Image (cartoon, rainbow, N blue to C red):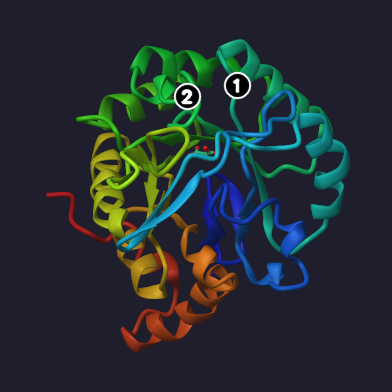
Amino acid sequence: MAVSVAGIALQNPVLCASGTFGYGVELEPLVRLDRLGGLVGKTVTAEPRRGNAPPRTFETPAGMLNSIGLENPGIESYCEEILPRLRGRAFRVFANVAGEDARSFARLVSRLDRAGGVDGIELNLSCPNVAGGLDFSTDARLAREVVAACRAETRVPLFAKLTPNVTDPAPIAVAAREGGADGLTCVNTVLGMAVDWRRRASRLSARHAGLSGPAIRPIALRVVDQVRRAVGGPILAAGGIATAEDALEFLVAGASAVQVGTASFVEITAPERVAADLPALLASAGVGDVNDLIGTLPKD
Ligand code: SIN
């Protein structure tokens, strides 16, 4: 089950997705974290954030909307209190950060680099719930600029997390790689909305929100395919992955590893279950090594 993603050795290709699993440590009594390939923490910003006012989640058919607004304890707390608790474990640690511009992204990356203990850094270029959050992954020039500024601060592998909310993700993926990203995470949430017609009001205080869960899986798969054909890998896939079957679809389509996200809200052990189910599913298809399956979907 072991895979290597941008030089990061994972014991299996299943990670939890940012924003769906806290920082992992909170879930320790409930989940056997050491069975996961990796853990991607909730986005961290320079200062602590309370996020948007409630209501900020709403369940939809086959998914959910969220407009959390990047609630987090801030980079200092993350480095001082959370990271030390994640060291020396079987899973790999991925931090996820968001800044307001290239310089603030770079400062966050520099702080993580100094802290140590981070195997990979995901750059959240695509949060739809804060002013300007989407700009970094809807504008190729900005994406390149942010990634290049971060690249200058660290040798830790960088992953640019892309939005599906563009006509064509390929130029953004190309720009992120040109800026120095080692890999790409595809995808963040799809912009959506829910209305309570009786109250004549949006169901979420932020009006618009990000849709995740099985409803967006075909969209995520299509973006993985487009990005792989444009720039190759490595790709971390996210978007409605809830079963080992789902995971293998993304691996065949070119992802090197998958992130289980919204499924964790239904079943907190979903990432662990997906990882545990993979070997038997692969064996049933006569595949002994998951690497023999990755990227086997013909490109044409
Ligand atoms: C949020 O905190 O609003 C969600 C983060 C994201 O979608 O990037």
Question: What secondary structure is marked by label 2?
Answer: loop
Residue 139 in the image, given as x and y percentages of width and height:
34, 17
Residue occupied by mark 2? 133
* Residue displayed at 28% across by 32% down: 169
Which residue reaches farthest front? 198
Work out whether residue 192 can be spotted: no
Residue at screen point 69% across, 37% down: 72
Residue 261 sits above or below residue 103 on the image: below
In front: 24, or 250? 24
* Above or below, 267 relative to 185: below
Which residue is found at the position 47% from the left and 24% from the top? 133
Whether disc 1's CB lies below 8 Å from ligand 1 is answered no
Residue under pointer 1: 99
Q: Quadrant of residue 294?
A: bottom left
Q: Amino acid at mark 1?
A: Gly
Beta carbon of the mark 2 residue lies under 8 A of ligand 1: yes
Residues packed near mark 1 inside 10 Å, few (<14), some (14 to 19) or many (20 plus): many
Measuring from the top left, give residue 242's x and y in whole percent. Answer: 42, 68
Residue type beneath disc 2 = Gly
